[in-house]
């Protein structure tokens, strides 16, 4: 499934809400989370990719009903609150879609070799 350019921008914004720039000492600040997200969806079977795309749209549009603005127009605290509300939804489907989206976003960024080195995972050493 191929994402459109605006969806890549959305994915970058959402992913950076889960793992903000500056986390891990800035080890993965230069990564384009939107491009990583798009690559991951392009390589996925259509059904899970469709679910993740729906989750992305849900995150982006859900603040419209409360704040009259999309997710991208919110400040950091409002974004965090919007994500928390969705993760605490009474709907199992909404919660599961958001947890899956969060898992993908965090895995993409923290799965980078530089992040793993920074964390000392797998006995990797930070390159000086």
Image (spheres, grey):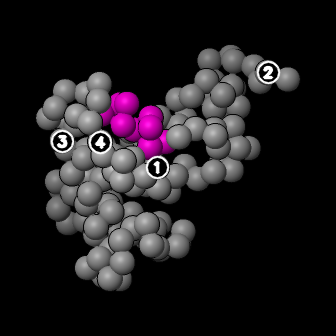
In the rendered image, the quadrant that contains the N terminus is top left
Q: Nearer the viewer, mark 1 or mark 2?
A: 1
88 or 42: which is nearer to us?
42
- Tell which circle, 2 or 3, labels the residue nearer the N-terminal end: 3
Mark 1 or 2, nearer chain start: 1
Q: Position of residue 112 (x, y in %)?
A: 57, 28
Dominant SS of magenta comes to helix
Left or right of 5: which side holds 21? right
Residue 50: x and y in percent read 18, 41
In the figure, is residue 22 to the left or right of 127?
Answer: left
The residue drawn where x is 26% and y is 36% is 2
Q: Give the label on residue 12, or none.
A: 1
Location of the C terminus (image quadrant):
top right
Measure the C-alpha gap from mark 4 to mark 1: 12 Å
Q: CA distance from mark 1 to mark 2?
A: 27 Å
- Residue 24 is left or right of residue 44, and the answer is right
Q: Is residue 98 above or below residue 73?
A: above
Q: Earlier in the sequence, mark 3 or mark 4?
A: 4
Write the start and end of the magenta stretch as one range. 33-41
- Mark number for residue 3? 4
Q: Residue furthest top?
A: 123
Circle number at residue 127: 2
Q: Would you call the spot at circle 4 few (<14 residues within 10 Å), some (14-19), or many (20 or more)?
A: some
The single residue placed furthest to the left in the displayed view is: 47
């Amino acid at each position: 499934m191929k994402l459109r350019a605006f969806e890549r921008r959305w994915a970058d914004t959402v992913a950076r809400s889960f793992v903000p720039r500056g986390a891990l000492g800035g080890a993965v600040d230069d990564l384009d989370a939107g491009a990583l997200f798009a690559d991951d969806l392009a390589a996925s079977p259509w059904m899970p990719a469709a679910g993740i795309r729906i989750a992305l749209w849900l995150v982006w549009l859900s603040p419209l009903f409360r704040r009259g603005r999309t997710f991208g127009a919110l400040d950091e605290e409002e974004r965090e609150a919007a994500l928390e509300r969705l993760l605490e939804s009474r709907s199992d489907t909404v919660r599961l879609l958001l947890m899956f989206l969060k898992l993908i976003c965090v895995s993409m960024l923290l799965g980078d070799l530089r992040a793993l080195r920074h964390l000392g995972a797998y006995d990797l050493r930070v390159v000086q």
